[in-house]
Image (cartoon, rainbow, N blue to C red):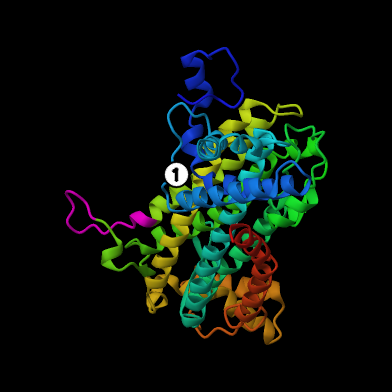
Amino acid sequence: MAQKLWEKNVLVDKEVENFTVGKDREMDLYLAKYDVLGSLAHITMLESIGLLTTEELHLLREELKQIYQQADQGEFIIEEGVEDVHSQVELMLTRKLGDTGKKIHSGRSRNDQVLVDLKLFTRAQIREITQLTFGLFTVLLDQSNRYKDVLLPGYTHLQIAMPSSFGLWFGAYAESLTDDLQLMQAAYKICNRNPLGSAAGYGSSFPLNREMTTELLGFETMNYNVVYAQMGRGKMERSVSFALAGIAGTLSKLAFDACMYNSQNFGFIKLPDEFTTGSSIMPHKKNPDVFELTRAKCNKIQALPQQITLITNNLPSGYFRDLQIIKEVFLPAFDELKECLRMVTYMMKEVEVNKQILDDPKYALLFSVEEVNRLVLSGVPFRDAYKEVGLAIEAGQFTPDKAIHHTHEGSVGNLCNDHISVLMQKIVDNFSFEEAVDAEKRLLQ
């Protein structure tokens, strides 16, 4: 059985060990290849300050690259009796390289190791989330342009209100995603700072070169104050989770609309039959289960910031084992949101639109405001025009003119989709993911 990094002569009680390790082995598989990247940068720096020889650096680097490949291909495992990913990597190196493998921990703690692992993992996940969000944005904007002239009812209080359009409906969710990615960009900047070298939260007496590891790992800058670097544990995850929740909120609202609009009582959209599921006793049923599950999954993701807050909100400065529990709710959330983004993109690309919704006379009153405005434009004061149309409706004498003329920015007749597209592209470009990607590639060369 492997010895723990911190273990000396006293063996810890087995039940205590199981409780304290918890789900760490499972969760740390998310972090394995990022732990290796952090170690590659760290040993390069150690060699530069004389704590490793050039030969030792070469040997360690080659072994770490092999471990990275195992992790990247899903073949990395944390053995029974090994506490976490950091211990497993060091154990593998020591088996191959003997005492040289034991040197990689000089100048760092598992505290700053897991901090850098989490940041590298999160940085990569944000890149994937951003790409998938941009993919959904593109589909929504394409559908907005495609159906820009197809009207549908707009609602307030779930009462028919004014004419809307599929151009507006699809486009609204596209623009919502621009704000979501703007928040994600702020979270990315918080994430993209290097904590390595803060050790247990109080620095090191070794002459570490933190600027070097910052550059090697492609971080924009570092968490300068070593105490704050440790305080950032939980804060970074909470900040990112708010951004994840923003995207999830947009998807959840879109899913609700889709479920409602797909129902027979609305009939605004239709999902292809192969995108629906049936009932065990009702042969006519075609249920929008993908959107219902998306709604539930995304509502769960929207609870993530509160979960992290409640785990961390009464902790003083310094490291506490409480922080370990954050991994259990934070790390899997990315896969869940990515899955929802993929499915919603697929569904929205194939959804069928009803082009004759407003032929139904029950929607006639949608055009009452259009009539009020027509009278105002002819010189009737607004309050008088409002009363005239209202009395006609009460007397059953209102006849709608369904020709609408909205020209201002963002309206039915002027969607401004070109501006929304430019805004989104600017936001995506400002992430500057390439710097991080290129740095990681260089480490693995």
Q: Is residue 181 above or below residue 148?
A: above
**Residue 283 falls in which quadrant of the image?**
bottom left
Q: Residue at x 60, y 78 (%)?
A: 417
Visible residue check, residue 13 = yes
Residue 283 colored in magenta in the image = yes
Relative image position of residue 268 (x, y in whole percent)? 39, 69
Q: Is residue 379 above or below residue 165?
A: below
Q: Is residue 400 above or below residue 383?
A: below
**Residue 344 falls in which quadrant of the image?**
bottom left
Relative image position of residue 128 (x, y in whole percent)? 54, 60
Per the rendered image, the range of residues in magenta is: 278-290
What residue is pinned by disc 1?
76
Under mark 1, the amino acid is Phe
Q: Residues within 10 Å of mark 1 (few under 14, many from 20)?
A: some
Tag 1, which secondary structure?
loop
* Helix, strand or loop for the magenta stretch, by majority: loop
Relative image position of residue 393 (x, y in whole percent)? 51, 71
Q: Residue at x 65, y 36 (%)?
A: 103
Visible residue check, residue 415 = no
